[in-house]
Amino acid sequence: LGAQCVHIRSFLPGGAVKNFMRPWLFAMFLATTFSARLEDDGNTGTDDDWSPVKLVINSNKKYQMPLKILLDSMRAIRFANFSDVIVVVGGADSDRIYTDNDMVYIETPFENYDLTGLSMLWHYRQHPYVLANVYLYLLDTSTVGAGFPEKFRSLGNVEQQEYRAVNRPASNICAFGRGVLEKFKTNFDEQLSKDEGLQFEFGQSPKGVKQIEAFAQKVTELRPRVDHGEPVDIYQTGHPRRVYWYPDFDILKYIFIGGNGDVTGTISQLKCCPLLQALHRKTKHHKAKKAKAKKH
């Protein structure tokens, strides 16, 4: 690949490894508490030659810390399939695809919050680095538990036209077959605001953007995600995030309920939908309950 490859450390601030160690150790503790815009070059092979499953991580140039913590969590549980990992980095300087440390990176100036990776996945769908029978879609503000490698391998039985996810809200974490991806076309190229992105997460279709399952012939609902109950400041921003566990993937997702921008230092409040407000009320109720318990 020569000059086409750029080491991922070019994204990271100095001392990143040291600074991320403590948040990552805390994430591991939590985990243990739960039981391409390139033209087709014609060299795509057949589905027998493709990876059974690829993990697609949706990220952004400004989210280097969450991405580092997620990748560290994967290394800590000795995940062995890094050649099947695709990291999509929105907000980059240019469009390009390359490999580094066995992983595939897709960089793009395009930014569409949680949906950037879905857009890039369709545009690069014929690239040899991207070809797979099944895709697991994940956000960078997550970590994985010890059972993740086995869960990842088991996704090889997802059907070509199948979509799998928990009942909403699901933070757009899902698995789907190659046949579903082929039908995306430019659906996820429509740029949404953060509030519109949340409307999408809760099942609406802002600006006509269709839900992923709209492209599937079979929809499989997984076991519900589990509220950990104790917000944690994993990114050391001063704004604790709620933690949700996805048992069928063994993934932990960290959510800044009701707000946005804690990682970048540009906090704003979200006023999207009643369901989000209900989650925010639940967080406040939990804090009040905890404070009351301490008094007694």
Image (cartoon, helix red, strand yellow):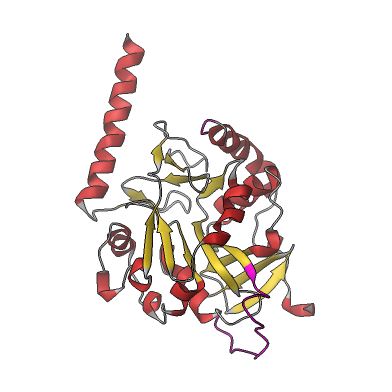
Q: Residue at x 65, y 84 (%)?
A: 44
Per the rendered image, the range of residues in magenta is: 33-51
In depth, the one of 133 and 250 nearer the eye is 133
Query: Is residue 247 within the magenta segment?
Result: no
Q: Residue at x 63, y 43 (%)?
A: 20
User: Picture coordinates of residue 100 (x, y %)?
Assistant: 72, 66
Q: Residue at x 47, y 75 (%)?
A: 179
**Image quadrant in which you'd find residue 97:** bottom right
User: Which residue is farthest top?
Assistant: 296
Q: Is residue 33 above or below residue 156?
A: above
**Image quadrant in which you'd find residue 220:** bottom left
In depth, the one of 153 and 23 nearer the eye is 153
Residue 69 visible? The answer is no
**Image quadrant in which you'd find residue 282:** top left
Query: Is residue 48 within the magenta segment?
Result: yes
Direction from residue 90 to residue 239 in the image, left or right: left
Residue 249 visible? The answer is yes
Magenta-colored segment: predominant secondary structure: loop
Direction from residue 96 to residue 287 in the image, left or right: left
User: Picture coordinates of residue 175 (x, y %)?
Assistant: 48, 60
In depth, the one of 34 and 27 nearer the eye is 34
Quadrant in which the N terminus appears: bottom right
Q: Is residue 47 above or below residue 254?
A: below
User: Picture coordinates of residue 261 (x, y %)?
Assistant: 41, 53
User: Which residue is farthest right?
Assistant: 2
Q: Residue at x 31, y 73 (%)?
A: 209
Quadrant in which the C terminus appears: top left
User: Picture coordinates of residue 211 (x, y %)?
Assistant: 33, 68
